[in-house]
Image (spheres, helix red, strand yellow):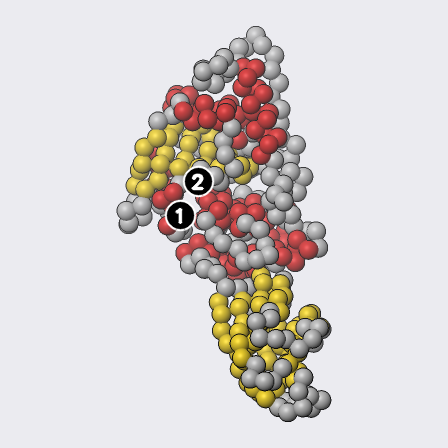
Amino acid sequence: MSGRPAGALAGIAMTLLLLAVPGGAVAKRPNPGVSLEVPRAAVPMHDVVLGEPGAAAARISASASSRRYSIDDGGAATIAVSVTPACEEECDVKDPQRVADFIGTLIHGPEVDLLSVQLDTKYELGFDCGFGAEACYFSGENKIVIGGYEEADEDGASFDFVLAHEYGHHVAQHREMPLPFGAAIDWGPERWASVEGVCQGERHHRFYPGDEGTHYFEDPGEAFAEAFAHYRFRDASPTWRYSPALRPNAAAFRAIREDTLSPWQGRTSFTLSGRVPARGEGAAVETMRTPLDGLVSLRPSSLRRHGYELALRSRAGRLLLRSRNAVEQGDSLNYTVCGEHRLRLVITSTHRNPGPFHLQIKRP
């Protein structure tokens, strides 16, 4: 289950809006004579991922007109950009075309046409994203909300860097993950997650997919978005504040590029054929590459009156999984690859005579 603090942040924003804003009015700064303490986030963070905007955020959004702008990437792609009236008066960054042009410099796929960006003041940002967040991504609306300020982060992260981080969330929102993992926006896309060992980290309680509370910096979804921004700003990135194990290297950058430009399309299927010795005379052993984490399924595609038992072993020979009885046609043996780059498939006959085997294999 996702640990994203959507409900808490939305509740804070809504409560404050009801206190400070009359019904039907657009949020403005509170009366200087009224003491209204602004709550801070429990954990310092760049941003937060939310599903849908609440009533407070909807009021602010309704005050801003939106238009589509070319991202000038050599194609016909456009994004929607809006600037709130308050931001038009106060913000450093308020030119919609400047925002669109920067998005065009990021690696992207067809998901870019779905994007909308809203520029807020710092005060509005608290109601939209939660006080303490510097930006947010609404996954249900393909929308980035960000403060319109050149230096958006107390650690020196620029507006463009934070915007690139948010676009990393947008990329992940439109990428698929194999079973049994959760959404890519929580785990990171498939190739990056496999390279960074997210499955292993989650099993050993080092990483916490989707947890933007106390484990914000161990959330691989956030680490992927940050690594995506580092990909764009390799020579001018802020200090890496996330889990050291997820700090991007050359392999991670390659995976980010491939996940963005050539998204994982689902499991591939192939047939493995050969002959298995007679019962008691050994076994057929095949090696199978498994470069990506996720569910691997093995199913006999033709028995031809010959049955056999299956066992999966690690590269070093450790037993991972085996069929309890002879597999029947239509049976399936499933195993979740979690960091094993190669598997040994051991096929043992249940009959007195040698015979052929044909296995249909699906892997990420």
Quarter location, residue 292: bottom right
Write the residue at 59% across / 78% down. Answer: 287
Label 2 sits on residue: 142
Are dots 2 and 1 in contact, CB under 8 Å?
yes
Circle nearer the N terminus (2, 1) = 1
Q: Residue at x 58, y 66 (%)?
A: 296
Q: Is residue 79 above or below residue 19?
A: below
What amino acid does circle 2 point to? Asn
The percent position of residue 282, horizontal first and vertical second, equals 68, 88
Quadrant of the image containing the N terminus: top right
Mark 1: amino acid: Glu
**Residue 354 place in picture, x, y as percent:** 62, 90
Disc 2 secondary structure class: loop
Residue 172 screen position, x and y as percent:
49, 49
Q: Residues within 10 Å of mark 1 (few under 14, many from 20)?
A: some
Q: Which residue is mark 1?
A: 111
